[in-house]
Image (spheres, rainbow, N blue to C red):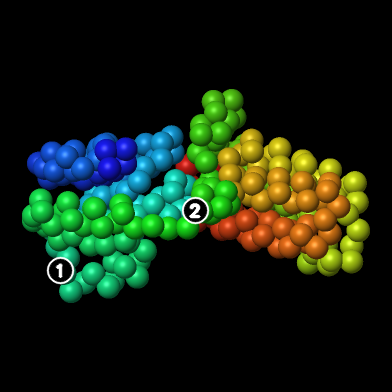
Amino acid sequence: MKSKIILIVEENEQARKLFEHCIGQLASVESVATAKEGLAFLANKAVDLILVSQQLPDLDGPGFLQKVRVTASPDCPVIATSAFAKEQEKPYFLNQGFADLLTKPIRPKDLILCLQEHLKKETKAPTAVQMARVFDPVPLQQLLKYSPPETLQGIYAEFIQECTELLQPSKLDSTIPITEDLLRALHTIKGNSGTLGAEKLFICVKQSEFLGRQGKAVEFTESLTHLKAAITEFETFLKKEGKFYGI
């Protein structure tokens, strides 16, 4: 399993060193002390499992998990560690979306067994859309070099409006012909979504444009339904998480 990569997000240096020592026998290890550092790492590199403390200095565990699912990894196992939670509270953490809970102090043997269990679990190969993040922060970092946040806020708002106007309910009617105007609009949204870091939306609109140009009416209409869901998801992300990224 040395080819596997595990990210440790742990504020306590002593605990972090212990985890690094134990996990280093099992897989490649990366470790950080804060949620911000963890999210920055995940924005540029995929990992196979994340071990995260519930007492981070800048964000609680559930908050970190939510950001991981939105911006970094949609299905990577995230295991919670806590010095205050009890084993009986595991169902709560599972309901939050964590793969497991390890209560501190953690015995090295229990840690290794837990990690082995989750790394060995077989899952269906995810689709490109399932693997995609709702938002890729890297393009935004580039945009911020040339435009102030206030300007970018307006650009993102205009982009959402553009997407919404394209996919009014009537335009999802399968009887509407695949017109060149519609395909051009999809092409424009595809370009803008890539520029603005709307990763999942970009993949969905790319698929819609492809099916439309192939003349596959039924598949095209179905793809527009997925595209509409991706637009709604991105709009929700901007409302809830935009301020975290300065937009």
Query: What residue is shown at x 28% (from left), y 71% (from top)?
Result: 92
Q: Which mark is residue 228?
A: none
- Label 2 sits on residue: 125
Vertical comparison of 246 with 240: above or below: above
Left or right of 133? Residue 89 is: left
Image location (x, y in percent) of residue 237 = 53, 54
Label 1 sits on residue: 86
For mark 1, give the secondary structure.
loop
Q: Quadrant location of the N terminus?
A: top left
For the residue carrying disc 1, how many other residues have a C-alpha within 10 Å: few (<14), some (14-19), or many (20+)? Answer: few
Using residue 123 as the reference point, say whether residue 98 is left or right of it.
left
Give the amino acid at mark 2: Ala
The mark that comes first in sequence, 1 or 2, is 1
Residue beneath the point at 27% across and 73% down? 91
The answer to whether residue 244 of the structure is visible from this angle is no
The one nearer the camera, 156 or 126, is: 126
Eyeballing the image, is 192 above or below 75?
A: above
Badge 2 element: loop
